[in-house]
Image (cartoon, rainbow, N blue to C red):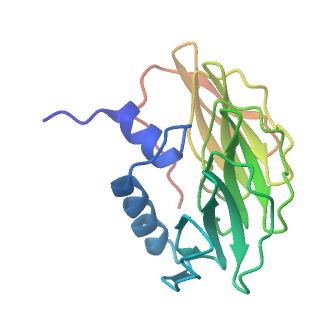
Amino acid sequence: MELDISKYLTIHKGFGVERTEDMRNNCVEEMLLHGAIFSKRVLDSGKYEEVEHFIFGYAGVKKNNLWAFVNKNEQEICDFIYQLVGYFTPDELVAVKRNNLWGFMDKYGREISEIKYVGVGDFHNGYAVVKEGKKYGYINRYGKEITKIEFDFANSFQHGKGLVIMNGKRGVVNSRGDIQVELFGVGRNFSLQTK
């Protein structure tokens, strides 16, 4: 059986796909592997239609078919205005979807980016992949776009760098948005190596 790479990236990078229960469970398992503080503490089941697990001290809660978050003290940190929500990351940020578009919120319930992207990836090392139309770019933890949204593909930041493809050529972008390694070659089979 051949692995559909685009489907894998869509599921695990959160590019605007509604997650099935199995996908949510896989995401939780992945978070556990990355040291997430995870709790199955149960909230008042009569108050919410659905309750997610507490991860890094926050849980998604659903009421009237819309999502919000509660903190570990069970205080709602934002209004119930989101169609879908992700899980908080170690960067203390979470992907949220409203009006069929994605953006990010911080642990205080403030939207740190415009809710304008057709897809987003989770924050890694202070940066996240965002998608507008069919093009990708990066934003920092303050919601500022550090690159133009111009790449045909962009991978999550690792070791302070992101891997990109543009016009069939591969390259590396640094945290200032500069292309550090000029675009070269073809294909998606490459990775960052550190010594």
Q: Residue at 37% of width from left, 35% of height from top? A: 7
- Of residues 133 and 72, the one nearer the viewer is 72
Viewer-proximal residue among 165 and 171: 165
What x and y, as percent, mark residue 51? 54, 69
Quadrant in which the N terminus is drawn: top left
**Spot occupied by residue 138 in the image (x, y as percentages of width and height):** 72, 38
68, 4: nearer the viewer: 68
Q: Where 22 sits versus 177, above or below? A: below
In this picture, residue 113 sits left or right of residue 188: right
Residue at the extreme front: 46
- Total labels drawn: 0
> Is residue 164 placed above or below 156 in the rendered structure?
above
Question: From what the image shows, is residue 168 above or below residue 137?
Answer: above
Residue at position x 86%, y 52% from top?
142
Across and down, in percent, residue 11 comes to 43, 44
Residue at (54%, 77%) from the top-left corner?
45
Foreground residue among 57 and 120: 57
**Location of residue 89 (image quadrant):** bottom right
- Residue visible at 77% across and 78% down in the picture: 75
Judge left or right: residue 99 versus residue 145.
Answer: left
Position in image of residue 111 (x %, y %): 84, 51
Asked whether, in this view, residue 190 is left or right of residue 65, the answer is left
Left or right of 115 in this view: 49: left
Query: Residue pushed farthest top?
Result: 167
